[in-house]
Amino acid sequence: MMSDSIPPEVVEQLRRFNEALTILEDTYLKHFSNSLEENAQRPPLEKLEIDLMSVFVINSLYWMLLCTHGQKPKENEVLQNEI
């Protein structure tokens, strides 16, 4: 079995990574499965919430991408400019 050769801490990190991706995907699908016309009919506050969530999702995915490439997001110059 492959997990026999993978250190337990790496398996745990992969499990948490998978959970985070699943949460992002579920949230994304919940709010973005509507058509553009349906989204245009939403109240302004709901549109704002979706826009803020979109920024958070993109930022989170970028954070995860950096982690998968062995970089430390807190030391990333692009993210530091955004924070």
Image: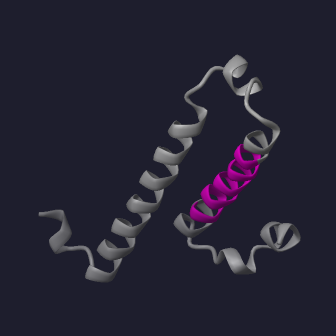
Residue 53 inside the magenta-drawn segment: yes
Residue 19, horizontal then vertical, whole percent: 39, 61
- Name the foreground residue: 54 vs 21: 54
Q: Position of residue 50 (x, y in %)?
A: 70, 44
- The residue depicted at 70 percent of the width and 21 percent of the height is 36
**Image vertical order of residue 46 relative to residue 8, above or below:** above
Q: Which residues are magenta?
A: 49-64
41 or 35, which is in the foreground? 41
Question: Looking at the image, is 33 positioned above or below residue 66?
Answer: above
In percent of width and height, residue 22 lies at 42, 52
Residue displayed at 73% across by 49% down: 49
- The residue under the point 68% across, 51% down is 53
Q: Is residue 2 left or right of residue 78?
A: left
Residue displayed at 39% across by 59% down = 18
Dominant secondary structure of the residues highlighted in magenta in the image: helix
Which quarter of the rendering shows the C terminus? bottom right
**Res 61 → quadrant:** bottom right
Residue 27 located left or right of residue 9: right
Q: Quadrant of the N terminus?
A: bottom left
